[in-house]
Amino acid sequence: MSVENIRIESLNEHIGVKLTGLDLESVARDPAFIRLVRQLLDEHLLVFIPQQTIEANTAQELTANFGPLLDIKRAGNKAHHVEGAPWIKVISNGLAPDGVPYGDGNSSAQIWHSDSTPWEAPVGHIAFYCRQTVDPVPKTYFKNMIKVYQALPQAVKDKVDELRVIHHFYPRQIEVAIHANGPSMPLEDRKSGFAHPLVRRVVGNNKPVLYLPTRRDSIVQGWSEQDSRALFEELWAFTNQCDFDCAVGLQPDDFVIWDNRATVHARDGWSNDQTRIMWHISSEGEIPTPLRTKRGVNTIGLDRDQAKAATAAIYNDY
């Protein structure tokens, strides 16, 4: 099957394309198809391919083109997941006939977030392959954070372009109820974690992205709790009112892959007496690169003390 026969349709003007006229199992290893998907992800951030029958290894190998695959299954969980496919995490609220969970997860609605931001090198790309859904079909929402950054007033850009944020770990932070009611961790814990630029550049398209922490009580390096909280409330309120979104109601055999670095996603919840089953595959991204990098000082020819003095002003706020 030639990639020239694939039909490409925009989901909307802001984010996402839908591919039809292909058999994903047949083309998933074709270098021309991989180049096409990479190009579409760089430009549109999300590729949706409905109604495909693919093998577990095919889904893994396709996602692996965008970075090393990650084992993101919940530690200590005895869920079934997918035998012989170690990189697939099953997201499900249901139990198999033997009473063991199909995978990790629940039926809770989720707030806007990007995955694994407390990691040094957060997830780069994510693929979902729907195996079973519920009625009504819950939607997954995706927002273009490149466009959110572009829409910021210039005064806000000037304020945030060089900031770094500590992304602390908070269990189940993406669930709506926990986001609304979960108490803050002690300040010492919120100051423990990897610091990422609040505005990062994405490898592939080199565009600036507003890279927000999920928790509004996160800490900006060098800022107070109160000032940090006020900034994130302001930025999330702005993000929420930006209509740079698309919504996909994933049906069985639908496949979607997106750039986790440049988007946030959310989902509807559903009644826990119904079971949804989703395959989830994640590939590792890069350590976030700041939009405004701090330039080094040429220390060639200086002795140790001179070099230390020359660079002190650059590194004293890290």
Image: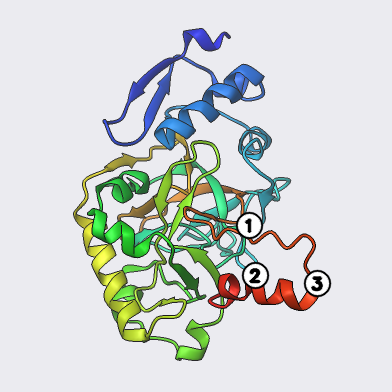
Q: Secondary structure at mark 1?
A: loop
The residue lying at 56 percent from left, 74 percent from top is: 313
Q: Which quarter of the figure has residue 114? A: bottom left
Position of 249 relative to 154 (above/below): above
Q: Position of residue 10 (x, y in %)?
A: 32, 25
Q: Which mark is residue 80?
A: 1
How packed mark 1 is, by other alpha carbons closer than 10 Å (few <14, some 14-19, many 20 or more), is: some
Q: Position of residue 172 (x, y in %)?
A: 45, 72
Position of 63 relative to 283 (above/below): above
**Is 1 displayed left or right of 266 in the figure?**
right
The residue lying at 38 percent from left, 28 percent from top is: 17
Identity, as a three-letter code, of the amino acid under mark 1: His
Q: Quadrant of the N terminus?
A: top right
Q: Which residue is mark 3?
A: 303
**Badge 2 or badge 3: first in the primary sequence:** 2
Q: Which quarter of the figure has residue 119? A: bottom right
The reply to whether residue 138 is in sight is no
Q: Which mark is residue 75?
A: 2
Identity, as a three-letter code, of the amino acid under mark 3: Asp
Separation (CA) of disc 1 from disc 3 = 59 Å
Q: Position of residue 156 (x, y in %)?
A: 27, 60
- For the residue pair 207 and 168, the one nearer the viewer reads as 207
